Image (cartoon, helix red, strand yellow):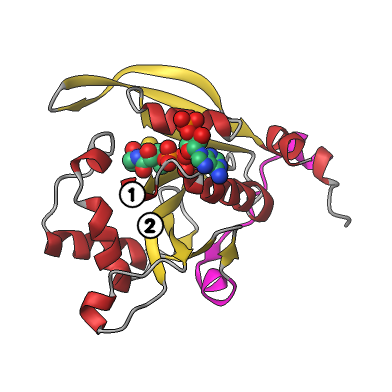
């Protein structure tokens, strides 16, 4: 049997190319113009702590304020999530800025020229319907340089290209203007605003639901 040409596959039934194991990216990390995107590791905890502890970063993410040990444990747990197979599974890629000294040197005594400045997530929303969710966090010192966009574009390429997602979506706190701008720069569409979907210290919050279809991604990528 011949594989369906890609255009026809868009209209055909969902066909996610899963399961996926992060060992693939251990061996062959993704490379963008300025970064290496490779599986998040427990040893990244010091770099991750530098952004995970900041109230500005946490403002619109449903993460609690963790102390350093709790944050290291959180990074360890996320690093252990290395398989996409069942709904709810997630994997995390460290955004490694080459040439930027890692904060791990504090622990190791060596200057490691590979700082983790943010991380990217892919979560399996629905295996049955080929739906993947994406997410991103970047250290404020490294925001406003297009790094989030560079990493997120590579993430969409993986989601649509390697995994053959039919639809990729991002759900954000509707007040999160930088993340909404990023979605729009990526070509994602605001499909809905879910009213009072989450509750936080400031009360009920709306969620902005952004998404892109595989055929839209293909058009964008030429
Ligand atoms: C959401 C988030 C990742 C966006 O990061 P960001 O730095 O604003 O995004 P980018 O890297 O794409 O930077 C874009 C900005 O840099 C500018 N820029 C500078 N150099 C650039 C370049 N080479 N390429 C593209 N943009 C560049 C752009 O003009 C753009 O500015 P604008 O938004 O005013 O138009 C960041 O705000 C963040 O980590 N927030 C906290 C965590 C969070 O809320 N995550 C999302 C949960 S849903």
Q: Is residue 163 magenta?
A: no
Task: State the residue in front, 136 or 148.
Answer: 148
Ligand 1 image position (quadrant): top left
Expressed as whole percent of the image width and height from the top left, the position of residue 203 reads: 16, 20
Residue that numbered label 1 is attached to: 141
Q: Secondary structure at mark 1?
A: helix
Residue 180 placement: quadrant: top left
User: Can residue 161 be seen in the rendering of this structure?
Assistant: yes
Q: Are marks 2 and 1 in contact (CB under 8 Å)?
A: yes
Q: Which residues are magenta?
A: 8-28
Q: CA distance from mark 2 to mark 1?
A: 9 Å
Residue at image mark 2: 117
In this view, the residue farthest toward the right is: 2
At x 41%, y 66%, the residue is 100
**Residue at 55% from the left image edge and 63% from the top image edge:** 20
Q: Return the x and y of residue 177 as percentages of the image width and height.
A: 38, 26
Quarter of the view holding residue 32: bottom right
For the N terminus, the quadrant is bottom right
């Amino acid at each position: 049997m011949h594989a369906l040409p890609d255009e026809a596959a868009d209209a055909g039934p969902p066909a996610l190319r899963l399961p996926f194991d992060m060992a693939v990216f251990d061996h062959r990390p993704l490379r963008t113009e300025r970064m290496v995107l490779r599986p998040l590791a427990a040893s990244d905890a010091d770099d991750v702590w530098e952004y995970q502890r900041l109230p500005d970063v946490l403002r619109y993410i449903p993460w609690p304020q963790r102390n350093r040990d709790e944050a290291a444990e959180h990074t360890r747990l996320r690093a252990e999530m290395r398989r996409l197979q069942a709904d709810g599974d997630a994997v995390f890629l460290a955004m490694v800025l080459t040439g930027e000294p890692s904060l791990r040197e504090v622990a190791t005594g060596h200057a490691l020229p590979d700082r983790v400045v943010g991380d990217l997530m892919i979560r399996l929303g629905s295996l049955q319907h080929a739906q993947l969710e994406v997410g991103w966090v970047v250290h404020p010192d490294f925001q406003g340089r297009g790094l989030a966009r560079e990493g997120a574009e590579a993430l969409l390429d993986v989601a649509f290209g390697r995994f053959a997602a039919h639809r990729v979506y991002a759900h954000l706190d509707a007040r999160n203007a930088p993340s909404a701008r990023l979605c729009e720069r990526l070509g994602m569409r605001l499909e809905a605003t879910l009213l009072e979907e989450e509750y936080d210290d400031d009360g009920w919050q709306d969620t902005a639901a952004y998404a892109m279809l595989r055929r839209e991604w293909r058009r964008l990528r030429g």
